[in-house]
Image (cartoon, rainbow, N blue to C red):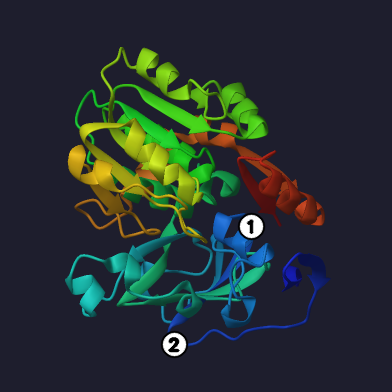
Amino acid sequence: MRKVKLIEPGKLVLENTDEMFGVTDSTVMVDVKACGICGSDLALYNGRRDLSGEHYFGHEFSGIILDEGKGANGMKKGMRVASELIKGCGRCWFCRNGLQNYCKSLNDALLPGGFTEQTLVTNTDAYSFLTPIPEDLDYVTASVMEPANCAFHVAMKADVKPGDNVLVFGLGAIGFIAALILKTLGAGKVIGADRSKLRIEQVRKTGLLDVVDTADANWLDQVKEMTAQEGLDVVIEATGAPAVLQDAFTAARTGGRIVVPSVYFGAVDGFEPLPIMRKELTIVGSKGPAPQLKADGTSAVLDKVIQLKDELNKLITVYDYKDALQAFADARSGAAIKAVVAF
């Protein structure tokens, strides 16, 4: 069984292993076809997260059910699926308080994760991290279901009104996909912001989003010109750079809303919180994926992925398994907006 294994921070290897995991009463076995590289995977790779406590590596995947286990939630052998938080238990404190995205840790949901050809995935009557996908959705595009769910969660937290102007700091996969989803929800002008020359070049090549370079001294003036001086109703801070939160305070209009899906690994030097009061800002966090369901209980995110399939494919760079180390290098440098490893 082929595997992309993280030995220690900064050291990845491609491995063939005989290690196998048996299906339990609470799991199904998935034959992984494609797995995307997430910022949290890079955090492990870069040593910003403790590798010793992690049971899985890779969580943005698609594939085929090899063993359905008890067949909870309608899972059957041969079914095409993608990773996505689709059901929480409904009984824990988090679920009862509208925080189903905290129901379980991914450590409790995946073993050994999507960077292995076969992985166990928790699937019970009370919890599921898989959603079925249709035959006409290819595995590579389907592998972005989980980050698209995270981005959909961001868009829901943004609470956009028709015509709202939006600025998205950080044009990695979450920020970019959130921008695309916000466009479909009726936002007015949606602008991307980044300071990586390589990332900006990649985004502009897609033709999907107007972008400002925040390394430019007059970036805020550019934003104001693009919004006809009306200001920004919503700001998404998706860089993971603590100092950019201060820029978000500056960019948001009086009465504006700031959504923060970033994972920060440091403090903000010289942080100035006064604008929170002076501008009556609303600041909300957005953590990971959450069940986003239609009235019939199926995934609302799946509809968005199908709707935005052509756009999403412009974000994705596909790497064969043998080139997985290059995929990680390109994800780190920004040469790939969304790097996906195909088995």
| Relative vertical location of residue 184 with respect to residue 317 in this rendering, above or below | above
Q: Residue at x 30, y 71 (%)?
A: 88
Amino acid at circle 2: Asp
Q: Quadrant of residue 254?
A: top left
Q: Is residue 60 above or below residue 238?
A: below
Q: Nearer the viewer, residue 136 or 193?
A: 193
Q: Position of residue 110 (x, y in %)?
A: 52, 74
Q: Earlier in the sequence, mark 1 or mark 2?
A: 2
Side (left or right) of 183 relative to 78: left
Give the residue displayed 56% in from the left and 61% down from the top: 40
How many badges with numbers are in the image?
2
Q: Can residue 69 be seen?
A: no
- The kind of residue tagged 1 is Lys
CA distance separating discs 1 and 2 = 24 Å
Whole-percent x, y for residue 115 in the image: 66, 65
Quadrant housing residue 86 = bottom left
Quarter holding the N terminus is: bottom right
Dot 1 and dot 2 residues touching (CB under 8 Å): no
Residue extending farthest front:
270
- Helix, strand or loop status at disc 2: loop
Give me the disc on residue 25: 2
Q: Nearer the viewer, residue 3 or 331?
A: 331
Residue that badge 1 annotates: 33
Across and down, in percent, residue 274 comes to 26, 45
Residue 132 rendering spot, x and y as whole percentages:
43, 57
Which SS class for mark 1?
A: strand
| 10 Å crowding of disc 2: few (<14), some (14-19), many (20+) | few
In the image, taking residue 95 as reference, residue 6 lies left or right, namely right
Q: Residue at x 23, y 23 (%)?
A: 163
Q: Mark 1: few, some, or many residues within 10 Å (few <14, many ≥20)?
A: many
Instruction: Classify 168 as above or below 119.
Output: above
